[in-house]
Image (cartoon, rainbow, N blue to C red):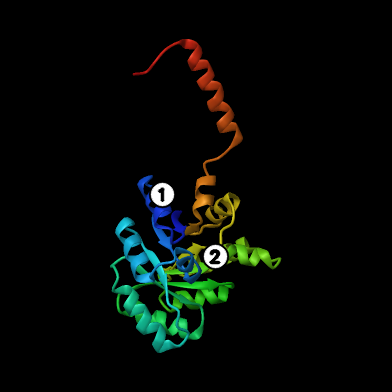
Amino acid sequence: MKFFVDTADVGEIRELAEAGLLDGVTTNPSLIMKAGRSIHDVVAEICAIVEGPVSAEVAALDFDGMLAEGRKLAEIAENVAIKVPLTWNGLKACRVLTGEGHMVNVTLCFTANQALLAARAGATFVSPFIGRLDDIGLDGMQLIEEIRTIFDNYAHLETEILAASIRSPNHVKLAALAGADVATVPPAVIRGLVDHPLTEKGLEIFLNDWKKTGQTIL
């Protein structure tokens, strides 16, 4: 499973990229707002740091507006993935933009039927929102499993499942078990994946015993 980071914080992205842990980045209007800078400047800087797909979202809701904004965002860098909502206009725009050779991430997916439509429209990625389904008492991970089954039934569907709205390390594990191609994860959750109390306890024991040897490696 590939790891994308869900943030527009360039400092966070740079640090994670330097660790070799990133395959891409996702942003959205809310994250751009938090960055407090022009979307063009933020996305350009991110694309210069990360070689993989960088999702940048359109704000228009009408078909013509989505096309115009999507094409403008695609001009920023070759690795921009144009993010469109899972609406009829979004699907129509997805079809045109992918036909022009652009990567497209169809976002705000909440049903397997929606994901199937996105795949039929030629989406590079479809983003089911796990956490938001959990918030309303549904099983977000079941959606990943359903989409995986449907996509595997039809080899010609090449759309990747991008598990989004991930809230915890457990979400990451379950998404991988369910067969998600990508997980887009907040920086704090990515860092949390490495934590375990037994790892810390074991390291403490090893270091204490090492001190008793009186040795140095260098």
Front residue of this view, candidates 1 and 70 = 70
Residue type for callout 2: Thr
Residue type for callout 1: Leu
Which residue is label 1 attached to? 16
* SS at mark 1 in the image: helix
- Residue at figure coordinates x 54%, y 72% from the top left: 109
User: What is the quadrant of the C terminus in the image?
Assistant: top left
Tell me: residue 67, above or below residue 218. Answer: below
Residue 185: image x %, image y %?
A: 50, 56
Which residue is label 2 attached to? 149
* SS at mark 2 in the image: helix
- Residue at figure coordinates x 32%, y 61% from the top left: 45
Horizontal side of residue 47 vs 133, given as left or right: left
Mark 2 packing: few (<14 Cα in 10 Å), some, or many (20+)? some
Circle count? 2
Horizontal side of residue 205 vs 46, given as left or right: right
**Earlier sequence position, callout 2 versus callout 1:** 1
Tell me: residue 170, above or below residue 69. Answer: above
Mark 1 packing: few (<14 Cα in 10 Å), some, or many (20+)? some
Residue 156 in sight in this render: no
- Residue at figure coordinates x 52%, y 57% from the top left: 179
Tell me: residue 185, above or below residue 159. Answer: above
Residue at far front of view: 36
Please tell me whether mark 2 or mark 1 is closer to you in this view. 1
Residue 154: image x %, image y %?
A: 46, 70
Front residue of this view, candidates 124 and 157 = 124
- Residue at figure coordinates x 47%, y 71% from the top left: 29
